[in-house]
Image (tube, rainbow, N blue to C red):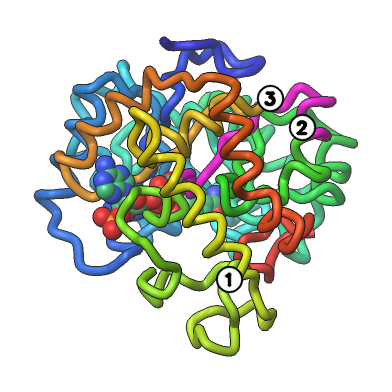
Amino acid sequence: MYKKFGNTDLKTSPIVFGCMGSAGAFGNQEEKDSIEALQAAFDVGINFFDTAEGYGNGYSEQLLAKALGTRRKEIIISSKVSVENMKKKDILEACDRSLKNLQTDYLDMYLLHWPVTNVSIEERVEALTELKASGKIRNYGVSNFGPQNLDEVLAITDICTNQIGYHLFHRAVEFEVLPKCIEHDIPVMCYSSLMQGLLAGKYKSLADFPANRARTTLFDSRTHSQSRHGGHGAEKEGQEALDRIWEITNNSDYSMEELAVGWLKAQKGVAGIIVGTRNAVQSRDLLKLLDVKLDPALITELGKATEKVKTALGANIDMWDHRSK
Ligand SMILES: NC(=O)c1ccc[n+]([C@@H]2O[C@H](COP(=O)([O-])OP(=O)(O)OC[C@H]3O[C@@H](n4cnc5c(N)ncnc54)[C@H](OP(=O)(O)O)[C@@H]3O)[C@@H](O)[C@H]2O)c1
């Protein structure tokens, strides 16, 4: 089940635990539930944990240390530096803060969280190279890098991953970014693999999806005040796709989460599928996601179900449409 992650010497589980929701990103969250969620994920076999200084301003990193600090040698941690800390000095300081939050002296992966900044890529890479040379980070990579951003970074260095939003309702990466990552041998980590819960088999209608999550380009900005993209979304195509995914789920032996993750597993170039849970019960469900492998016919059906959404939303990989190139 554990596989070598790209060109690193890390052996990772196919499912990565995403620590954003457990730090309260989706609303009120009890610390006890978050700790139990992390520990249950480890207990089912997940060894890869994705966090960021931006998740709860370091709180998510602290939670990970609290829950699994004694397991440090058995787990792989990726953390990310926030876009407002992209000057060399700020990246170095941010890394030290993350190490302190995580109560560790190394990060397995350290990623530039978002690309858009007025700090040159050379300066950002210089900081990452220095951190790697000092042993504070073992590998570095990027997140949310579009085609232009990737060209810029690849001109000066190799990267261990590009962490991007990729799931059945957001397939923009298939146009340019995924082919480019495959061409350059960059393993992709996909996030929001369950579309923040829409693909967890709880919602029959897009209209029922909580307003604080209905902020992506799928939703119409005119009727979703918390979204910042300003576009008209693709809700008609999205609802048709959701209806079809429900049909496929009801006619199969799989849960919707298994179908969503099984479909991602079948996509070339994907090396880690990040899923977030909020409690131990949800984490125990991750066990079936570790092993799921779908028949090619089901993979094709799921692809067809979301083809119109893919076409309607186009090639912009930024799910919120305001930060990537
Ligand atoms: N690099 C980046 O810019 C970036 C951006 C976003 C996310 N990420 C990473 O990706 C991770 C995952 O993405 P995400 O948190 O956006 O969303 P996600 O994994 O697509 O969805 C998480 C939500 O799915 C629901 N869920 C999960 N397992 C479930 C189960 N067994 N039963 C019922 N519901 C279940 C929960 O909803 P409820 O809350 O309703 O219980 C949970 O909060 C984050 O934690 C973070 O590590 C990275």
Amino acid on which disc 2 is placed: Cys
In this picture, residue 292 sits left or right of residue 85: left
Alpha carbon separation for disc pair 1 and 2: 29 Å
Can you tell which quarter of the image residue 27 is in? bottom left
Figure check: 287 above or below 114: above
* Sooner in the amino-acid sequence: mark 1 or mark 3: 1
Residue 288 placement (x, y as % from top left)? 30, 25
Q: In which quadrant will I find the C terminus?
A: bottom right
Q: Nearer the viewer, residue 185 or 232?
A: 232
Tag in front: 1 or 2: 1
Q: Which residue is mark 3?
A: 268
**Quarter that holds the N terminus:** top left
> Which picture quadrant has residue 57?
bottom left
Determine whether, in the image, residue 278 is placed left or right of residue 313.
left
Q: Position of residue 239 (x, y in %)?
A: 52, 64
- Give how far apart the Cα atoms at labels 1 and 3 are: 28 Å
Q: Amino acid at mark 3?
A: Lys
Viewer can see residue 254: yes
Membership of 186 in magenta stretch? yes
Picture residue at 66% right of the left edge, 15% below the top: 7
> How packed is label 2: few (under 14 Cα within 10 Å), some, or many (20 or more)?
some
CB of residue at label 1: within 8 Å of ligand 1? no
The mark that comes first in sequence, 1 or 2, is: 2
Residue under pointer 2: 181
Element type where label 1 sits in the image: helix
Q: Is residue 63 magenta?
A: no
Q: Residue 45's spot in the image, x, y percent?
A: 28, 19
Q: Which label is found at residue 235?
A: 1
